Image (spheres, rainbow, N blue to C red):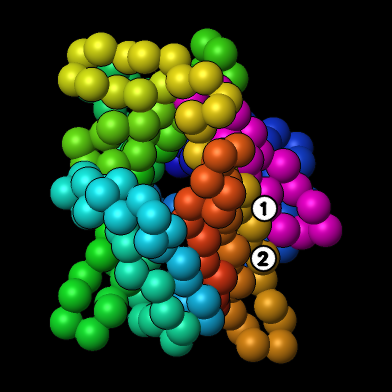
């Protein structure tokens, strides 16, 4: 079985991840990884930028809601793109009562440039290079170069307009659960979007 895009980008460092994270990011038998959990805290787009939040809901990317104890589901589906490169679709659904909000993306491995390409939204509206690292068994993901996607047109974004993401995913032995924290910051706005929670995958 071919190595996942995360194994390929991390190389030997992949085996420094907690064993449960290694299993999670190997995508055994090419099956989707499906899980459910609760966001302890989640902050949507700041109130002063609600148009950005409502626009995000149309592209399954950002949203204005916030709260505590918010249920969510996660689904990662590996596949092969038209160009033959491995890719993984990320679907994250947050349940605010009867309202569902999304934070979706498509990650691809660019073997030529040795980078994970992250296409955010559906259809994608923002592109970002991702840098992956391992720290004490946890997976760290940070966003780097970003571009605005307007159909076939790609516009490089100056740093002042970028939303820099920092993601940390770990495994908590005591709870037999995965812990996730995500924070997206902009130099002007501050925190654009953030969440912190835990999730379980019973079939792994």
The image position of residue 61, as x and y in percent, is: 31, 49
Q: Which numbered tag is attached to residue 56? A: none
Q: Quadrant of residue 153?
A: top left
The image position of residue 84, as x and y in percent, is: 32, 21
The image position of residue 86, as x and y in percent, is: 39, 31
Residue 118 shows in this picture: yes
Residue 90 shows in this picture: no
Does the magenta-highlighted stretch encompass residue 142? yes
Q: Is residue 86 above or below residue 151?
A: below
Q: Residue at x 63, y 34 (%)?
A: 131
Does the magenta-highlighted stretch encompass residue 110? no
Please state if 167 lies on the left or on the right of 85 as rendered.
Answer: right
Q: Residue at x 16, y 82 (%)?
A: 98
In the picture as drawn, the residue positioned furthest to the right comes out as: 136
User: In the image shown, does 38 or 47 lie closer to the viewer?
Assistant: 47
Identify the secondary structure beneath mark 2.
Answer: strand
Q: Quadrant of residue 11?
A: top right
User: In the image shown, does 50 or 43 lie closer to the viewer?
Assistant: 50
Q: Residue at x 52, y 76 (%)?
A: 41
Q: Which residues are the magenta region?
A: 130-146
Q: Which residue is mark 2?
A: 170
User: In the image shown, does 115 or 150 lie closer to the viewer?
Assistant: 150
């Amino acid at each position: 079985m071919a190595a996942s895009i995360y194994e390929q980008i991390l190389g030997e460092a992949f085996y420094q991840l907690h064993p449960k994270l290694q299993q999670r990011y190997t995508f055994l038998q090419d099956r989707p990884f499906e899980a459910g959990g609760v966001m302890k805290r989640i902050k949507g787009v700041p109130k002063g930028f609600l148009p950005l939040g409502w626009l995000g809901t149309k592209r399954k990317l950002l949203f204005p809601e916030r709260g505590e104890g918010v249920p969510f589901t996660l689904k990662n589906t590996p596949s092969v793109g038209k160009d033959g490169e491995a890719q993984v679709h990320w679907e994250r659904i947050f349940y605010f009562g009867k309202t569902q909000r999304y934070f979706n993306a498509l990650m691809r491995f660019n073997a030529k440039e040795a980078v994970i390409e992250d296409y955010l939204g559906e259809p994608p509206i923002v592109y970002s290079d991702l840098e992956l690292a391992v720290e004490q068994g946890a997976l760290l993901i940070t966003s780097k170069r970003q571009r605005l996607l307007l159909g076939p047109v790609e516009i490089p974004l100056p740093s002042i307009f970028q939303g820099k993401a920092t993601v940390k995913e770990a495994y908590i032995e005591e709870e037999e659960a995965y812990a996730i924290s995500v924070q997206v910051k902009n130099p002007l706005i501050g925190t654009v979007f953030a969440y912190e929670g835990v999730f379980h995958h019973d079939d792994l």
